[in-house]
């Protein structure tokens, strides 16, 4: 088993974190999985699992989680769990993962017969808050892969994927641009970047 570091940033854990390790998790009290709980789930499920570059999966998860807004951090820690571990949707439900977060994790899980490109577009065009969360995490995931592109061979078109997801994020997740001076039309960016 891998040893989970004290904190994603390397800082010391808070007194609350240390104390809560010995009693019922906060999610049992609040009904929601906090990002610290999602991190523990990810470490427990991924264990010593490694990615194509030979590094621990949890190192990738830490970088992705550190790159997203706090509201997307739970999804970031869990984004590879259904695809790369034996965890199921029912397991995550039992852990208390909220429905919208679970839907985002499912969006981020590529089906075994789904191409990388089709999966990217499915995330890009996903509607609702689960789509917004999935796009935020997917962009951080892609950026992490792009930053390590020379570390391992990959045939995935990460640059293409980033352009498409970013275009859809601009279209669906940003506030609409102001009306033109004539007040008649607005221009929205296209999803296909």
Image: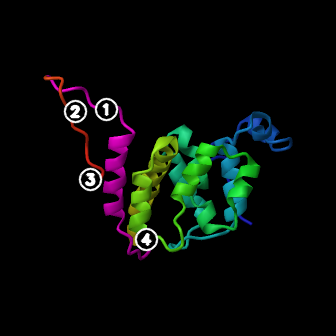
Q: Earlier in the sequence, mark 1 or mark 4?
A: 4
Which quarter of the figure has residue 170? top left
Which residue is outermost to the left? 182
- How far apart marks 4 and 2 lie (CA) works out to 34 Å
Q: Is residue 103 left or right of residue 89?
A: left
Q: Which residue is mark 3?
A: 193
Q: Which residue is mark 1?
A: 176
Label 2 close to label 1 by CB (< 8 Å): yes
Mark 4 burial class by Cα count in 10 Å: few <14, some 14-19, many 20+:
few
Name the residue carrying label 2: 186
Q: How is the image coloured?
A: rainbow
First of labels 4, 3 by sequence position: 4
**Closer to the camera in the image, 59 or 32:** 32
Horizontally, is 84 left or right of 3 in the view?
A: left
Q: In this orientation, does residue 117 appear?
A: yes
- Label 1 vs label 3: CA separation? 17 Å
Task: Determine crowd level at label 3: few under 14, some 14-19, many 20+ residues with C-alpha closer than 10 A.
Answer: some
Which region of the structure is painted magenta?
A: 152-181
The circle drawn on residue 115 is: 4
């Amino acid at each position: 088993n891998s040893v989970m570091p004290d904190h994603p940033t390397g800082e010391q854990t808070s007194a609350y974190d240390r104390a809560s390790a010995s009693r019922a998790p906060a999610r049992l009290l609040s009904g929601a999985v906090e990002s610290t709980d999602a991190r523990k789930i990810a470490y427990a499920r991924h264990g010593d699992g490694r990615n194509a570059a030979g590094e621990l999966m949890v190192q990738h998860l830490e970088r992705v989680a550190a790159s997203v807004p706090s509201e997307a951090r739970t999804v970031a820690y869990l984004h590879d769990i259904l695809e790369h571990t034996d965890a199921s949707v029912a397991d995550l439900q039992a852990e208390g993962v909220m429905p919208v977060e679970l839907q985002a994790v499912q969006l981020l899980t590529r089906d075994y017969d789904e191409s990388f490109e089709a999966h990217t577009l499915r995330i890009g065009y996903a509607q609702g808050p689960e789509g917004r969360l999935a796009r935020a995490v997917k962009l951080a995931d892609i950026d992490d892969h792009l930053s390590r592109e020379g570390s391992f061979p990959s045939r995935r078109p990460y640059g293409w994927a980033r352009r498409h997801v970013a275009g859809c994020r601009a279209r669906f997740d940003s506030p609409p641009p102001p009306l033109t001076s004539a007040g008649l039309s607005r221009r929205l960016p296209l999803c296909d970047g």
